[in-house]
């Protein structure tokens, strides 16, 4: 029996593909239900260097959908806990946790080092738009998560160019705001075509960009859809790293 933790990976992608993944540098922005599962899939997928960015701490309400959220980690920084988890999976991985909020003041520090791929798993719309705009300016390959909350049907998850998305309220906002920034297409996203589910208790959900994060109450999230978004993002990144990074 093999003692190589990536033996099954190499059987799938070959030695050259494995080497590309081991040499790759990937950043995950946002380590919630989407980003935490994406980060774990990347380290299990053989990516050699990870930068994990999140300003937040783990809350008890995260336990239903975030891979690093357990009783013992409540109150701890998400980036630090996720980095520790990555090292328990692959002790030799180069993982850098960054407990910071992405914004105009931190963009150069967090993106200036360059990456082979960036995963946008941010919830906050303003930061999300800035990250995608900055990646485009810097020529950094990026994939973005659209709205995973208020969804329950795993069969409706797709990968597409943001210009081709339908039925996702967050994607509609992002398309509109990105066009104002001169970006019409060219950003792959994971999204769901599931119709927006009615909110209970008479709550309402605003769809304008300035109010997207200020609803009367947060949207519900399942234990399935945000993780599947993250796993799908990681799968797309792994596939592209294997095929697009020169040997």
Image: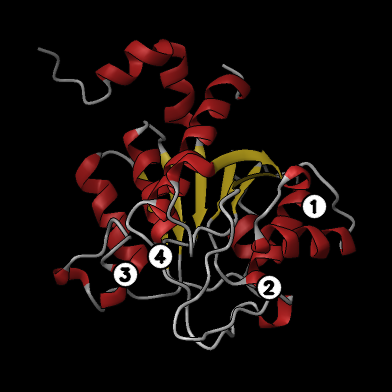
Badge 1: how crowded within 10 Å, few (<14), some, or many (20+)?
few
Q: Which mark is residue 137?
A: 1
Residue visible at 81% across and 45% down in the picture: 185
Question: Total label count?
Answer: 4
Mark 4, residue position: 221
Give the Cα separation between the discs numbered 4 and 3: 10 Å
Residue visible at 76% across and 43% down in the picture: 164
First along the sequence among labels 4 and 3: 3
Give the Cα separation between the discs numbered 2 and 4: 21 Å
Give the Cα separation between the discs numbered 3 and 2: 22 Å
First along the sequence among labels 3 and 1: 3
- What is the x, y in percent for residue 240? 58, 28
Q: Is residue 33 left or right of residue 150?
A: left
Mark 3, residue position: 62
Secondary structure of the residue carrying tag 1 is helix
Badge 2: how crowded within 10 Å, few (<14), some, or many (20+)?
some
Mark 2, residue position: 126
């Amino acid at each position: 029996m093999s003692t190589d933790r990536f033996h099954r990976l190499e059987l799938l992608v070959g030695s050259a593909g494995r080497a590309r993944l081991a040499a790759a540098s990937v950043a995950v922005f946002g380590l919630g239900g989407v980003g935490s599962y994406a980060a774990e899939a990347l380290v299990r997928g053989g990516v050699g260097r990870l930068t994990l960015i999140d300003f937040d701490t783990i809350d008890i309400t995260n336990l239903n959908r975030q891979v690093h959220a357990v009783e013992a980690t409540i109150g701890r920084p998400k980036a630090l806990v996720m980095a520790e988890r990555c090292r328990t999976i692959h002790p030799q991985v180069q993982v850098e946790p960054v407990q910071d909020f992405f914004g105009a003041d931190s963009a150069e520090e967090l993106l200036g080092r360059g990456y082979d791929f960036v995963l946008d798993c941010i919830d906050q719309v303003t930061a999300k738009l800035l990250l995608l705009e900055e990646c485009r300016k810097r020529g950094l390959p990026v994939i973005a998560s659209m709205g995973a909350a208020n969804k329950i049907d795993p069969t409706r998850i797709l990968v597409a160019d943001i210009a081709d998305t339908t039925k996702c309220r967050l994607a509609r906002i992002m398309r509109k705001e990105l066009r104002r920034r001169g970006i019409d297409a060219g950003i792959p996203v994971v999204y769901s075509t599931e119709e927006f589910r009615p909110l209970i208790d008479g709550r309402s959900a605003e769809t304008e960009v300035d109010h997207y994060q200020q609803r009367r109450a947060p949207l519900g999230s399942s234990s399935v859809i945000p993780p599947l978004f993250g796993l799908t993002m990681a799968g797309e990144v792994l596939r592209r790293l294997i095929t697009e990074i020169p040997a």
